[in-house]
Structure formats: structure tokens, C-alpha cells
Image (cartoon, helix red, strand yellow):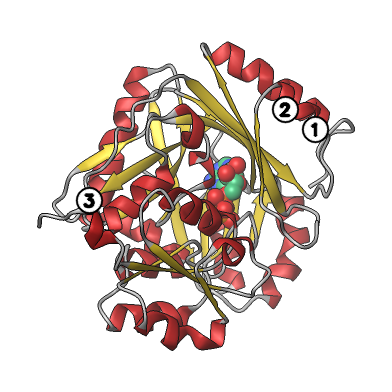
Amino acid sequence: MKFFLQDLSRVRVGILGGGQLGWMMVLEGRKYPLKFYVMDSPEAPACKVADRCFKPDEYKEMIDSVDVVTFEFEHVYEEALRYAYEKDKLLPTIESVELKRQRWKERVFYKEHGIPTPRFFIAHDVEEVYRIAKNEFDYKCVIKQSTGGYDGKGQFFIKSKNDLDSSIDVIKKISDVFVVEEFVEFDYEASIIAIRTFDGVFKTYPPTYNRNEKGILVYNYGPISNTYISMKMVEIAKRLADSLNYVGVMGIEFFVRGDEVLVNEFAPRVHNTGHYTLDAAFTSQFENHVRALLGLEIGETKLLSCGGMVNILGLANPPLEVLKYGKLYWYGKNEARKRRKMGHVNIVGETLEEVKNKIDKVMELLYPNGLDL
Ligand code: ADP
């Protein structure tokens, strides 16, 4: 379809969830004459910059009044997601959300589509968890609760029989299915941000190195220097996006072990490891997500420089000396809690080494006593 700019001024984009991802989506989308309606509480970052804010119980009104509905978080607002799907307005599609509702489904999907992932088994009760951990993994594994998992919640890292015995009482209290998977001794973690359009046009940003701590991203930077590994990630991302008939931006997280690339998980939305694209790429992941939703051309994903990002976790008042090394994005959340993402610092540089050095400096400034997560 041929669009002209004026057509966009009639388009309303709905975003479920008003956190930082929605905030950046709105701010980036503001380059176009679009209207953004956000569903969350009024003090949520994206609500503050939206054209209209709707409370979660007003989801029907919000969905009825927009042309397309997207989301910044897949683990909430089940009814709203379903309603948007029923109204044929939801993007990315419901299939990708449903895979994220149950971790075991995501793993099985990878297996069925030839996407490499850590060796895993599905356990339906605590006895099965124990048996698999002992017999299949010799007490070296990760036990993951199937529902509601994000930012490392509901995960048990088992390195010995002792670890298993001391976790089992907690696991016993959780009534859920579990994925028990190999403990991957990775060389590093990495991720890729991919975009796919209605017509199947597919692009990615170059993959980055990620540093996670206690299940939460601390910083990332890229592009990763191993072109063979990068190529593998692009291939996997394409297979995943195509098999979901995906529309929009997705983030895929990997473990890299030697020449092997294993998918840990994907997120059907813009992703924390893509924040660096705001400054290091010609078009950011947020703008490209909005463009994909509207059926517009996808912007250039090439990097203009090396880049990276440091998350500001749990700090209410970070030192402004960080501005010496990068650009601050402050989400304006009402309260700083441990592990909460309050803002981030984007960093660019001519070489990876320069970026990494700046990241180290920012880390020292933000967390002089080390990270407390
Ligand atoms: P969530 O879905 O809660 O974000 P992830 O499954 O992404 O959690 O795991 C968070 C982090 O925990 C990963 O980035 C990695 O550092 C570590 N991790 C998870 N699974 C494994 C595994 N099988 N082997 C080694 N480390 C793992």
C-alpha cells in the first residue's frame, strides 16, 4: 500500500505497558505524526509522554480506540492481549506471546524448528525434577519454572547434590511445570535484535556481547567480532522470525560455547540489549518496531560506530560524571528499588575496546562498591 505522511496523522498506536520500553517507543515514534495511547498507571514512564493514558481496567476502551496494538512486556495483561488479538489489532502476533507464557513450549518450539538450544527435559512434579537433575545432568543443571519467568525469577542454579537438596523444598512449594536444562559453560552471552515486516522483509542489527548478573542484564556492547558466530545468529533469528510469521522487532539471547550458538530465549518485543541502537545505529530498534507495525519501510540497521549500554539498576541518584563517557536516558520512575531498571547510559566509540573501556568507567561510577543485585 502506498502511504503519504498525512495518512500517519490519523493513526493511533496502542502500547500495553508503560515502562521504559514503551517510553522509548513513544519518544522515537514521535518523529512521525502518530498518536500514542499507553495502558498503565498514570505515573508510568510511557504514560507521561503518551497522547493518552488508560488504566489497565480500561483496556477495551483503549484497544477499541487505536489502529494497532503492541506491547512492551509479554508477561502481563493477558486479557488485554487476547482482546487485541480478537480485534485483529495485535502485533507481534499472539503465537509468539503464547510461546512465552510457558517456557517449556518455547523450548519445544526450538527443537521442532531445528533451532539449537540447551539440552532440556520437561518435569511435571518435584520427583521428576529431582530424577532428571540426578540422572540426566549429574546434579549440574538449571531448573526453570515454566510460567512467569523473567529477569531470573523462578530459576534454580544447581551445581551439586547439595544445591539440589537445598532447593528442593522451595521447588516443592511451586505448583508448575519445570524445564530442567543443562548448565551451559558458555564463553560468553550474546544477543541479536531482528525485525521482520508483513512482507517477510528481514533485517538484524549486529549482535552484541551481553553481561548478565543474577538473571539481569548489566551491560552490553558490540558488534561482536566473530563473523562466523554472527552469521549463525542471523540465520537462527531468520528461522525463528519466519516460522512465527513475525511482524515487529524481537530480541534473541544466546549462549556461545566455542563455535556453538545456543538460543537461551527470545523476547517478542523491543529489547534491553537493543538500547544502544538509539545512538550507534542509523535507525533505532524502537523506530523500526513502529515502522514495522505500520507496514512502512524498515530503516537502515547498520551501525555508525561501535556501541554499548550500561543499565542503571536500583539507583535513585546516579552521578552525572557518567556524562563524560556517554548519554544518559533517565526513565523518571517514581521509586528506586533493588534491581529496578531506572535508566541507562548509552556509549559509542570507534573501536570495541574504546566502548568497553568507557563501560568499565561508567560501571565504576555507578557501582563503586560493586553490584548489589
Ligand atoms: P529470564 O527468562 O528470567 O530472563 P533466562 O532464562 O534468560 O531468565 O536466564 C537469565 C540468565 O541466567 C541468563 O542470561 C544466563 O546468564 C543464566 N542462565 C540461564 N540459563 C542458563 C543455563 N542453562 N546455563 C547457564 N546459565 C544460564
Q: As shown in the figure, which amino acid type bears the numbered disc 3?
A: Leu
- Near-viewer residue (354 or 119): 354
Q: Nearer the viewer, residue 372 or 167?
A: 372
Q: Is residue 113 left or right of residue 218?
A: left
Badge 2 density bin: few <14, some 14–19, many ≥20, Cα 10 Å: few
**Frontmost residue, 297 versus 175:** 297
Amino acid type for the residue under numbered disc 2: Leu
> 72 left or right of 341?
left
Determine crowd level at label 3: few under 14, some 14-19, many 20+ residues with C-alpha closer than 10 A: some
Crowding at dot 1, Cα within 10 Å, few <14 / some 14-19 / many 20+, comes out as few
Q: Is mark 1 within 8 Å of ligand 1?
A: no
Element marked by disc 2: helix
Q: Which residue is label 2 attached to?
A: 323
Residue occupying the point 59% across, 55% down: 20
Instruction: Return the mark for residue 320.
Output: 1
Residue 274 picture location, percent across and down: 48, 40
Which numbered disc, 3 or 2, marks the residue that appears first in the sequence?
A: 3
Label 1 sits on a secondary structure element that is helix
Contact (CB < 8 A) between labels 3 and 2? Answer: no
Q: Which residue is mark 3?
A: 296
Can you see residue 232?
yes
Residue 263 shown left or right of residue 234 in the figure:
right
Q: Residue 9 falls in which quadrant of the image? A: bottom left
